Image (spheres, helix red, strand yellow):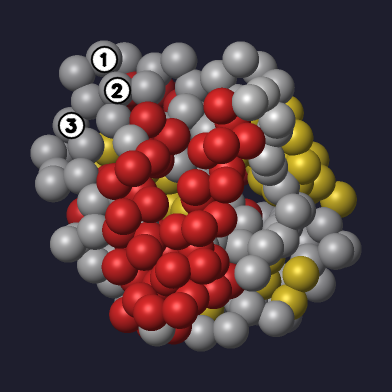
Amino acid sequence: KFHEKNYSKKPLVTIITVVYNDEKCLEGTILSVLNQSYKNFEYIVIDGGSTDKSLNIIKKYNDFINYWVSEKDFGIYHAMNKGCKLALGDGLIFLNSGDKFVGNVLNEKLQFPCLLPCKVKEKNGEIWDKKISNIRYGMPTSHQAMIFNNKKILYNLSYKISSDYDFFIRHGSFVNFNSSSKGYVLYNNTGVSKTKKWQRDFETIVIIYKHFGLLTSFIFLTKQIIKMIYKMIGIKWH
């Protein structure tokens, strides 16, 4: 396996991919991991019991995946918790099916925790740069563009869409931006957080209130209302 090679002076990174019935995109995600020039990583794939050809794709790369399992779960965060419990790396990153590393994202200069360069791909094919935003008003960047310290913290399953934000906050400050990266993370913005925006925002308000107080949660709500108005009149807000 990758982490058994002699890379003792380089930090071990655990990369976790969660998938369920995504035969169209899974292989691209896997290949983007395996093609990284930085090789001191372990790769974990958690499949939720797919009924399409996803499992065949996983088996195709069996020799290059450190651990995989295919079984029913209770949703994406439950699946990600399985990966957290297995992770041996100093750093932890979640690159779910449909998301990709473009270019050599990982390198020997990694410091954990850190944020990675990120672009977002919309359903219509549009791709735009993700800018770092204030952590007090939601995720500062896409979850896939974060490398966490492996603290064995688990996702709170009471949140169905925004548990990644709560997970991020509970890990503490992210002060490092990996500007030395020769690539970027491409986040495929077609998941449940895109289709269930109201539930996502409600959970985010609850999380902000819990960690930052009433005023901050009210400011976030105001921002979301302004974004909705912008969308109604045809102005883009990224």
Q: CA distance from mark 1 to mark 2?
A: 5 Å
Q: Amino acid at mark 2?
A: Asn
What element does badge 3 sit on?
Answer: loop
The front one of 219 and 177 is 219
Residue denoted by label 1: 52
Q: Where's residue 82, x and y in %?
A: 25, 59
Q: Looking at the image, is mark 1 or mark 2 earlier in the sequence? A: 2
Q: Looking at the image, is mark 3 or mark 2 earlier in the sequence? A: 2
Q: Amino acid at mark 3?
A: Gly
Find out whether the residues at labels 3 and 2 contact each other: C-beta distance under 8 Å: no
Q: Where's residue 86, x and y in %?
A: 31, 65
Q: Amino acid at mark 1?
A: Asp
What element does badge 1 sit on?
Answer: loop
Left or right of residue 228: residue 164: left
What's the residue at 38%, 40% (across, down)?
197
What's the residue at 77%, 42% (across, down)?
129
Q: Residues within 10 Å of mark 2 (few under 14, many from 20)?
A: some
Residue denoted by label 3: 49
Q: CA distance from mark 3 to mark 2?
A: 8 Å
Q: Where's residue 84, x and y in %?
A: 34, 66
Find out whether the residues at labels 1 and 2 contact each other: C-beta distance under 8 Å: yes
Q: Residues within 10 Å of mark 3 (few under 14, many from 20)?
A: some
What's the residue at 22%, 25% (across, down)?
50
Q: Is residue 96 above or below residue 139?
A: above
Quarter of the image that includes the C terminus: top right
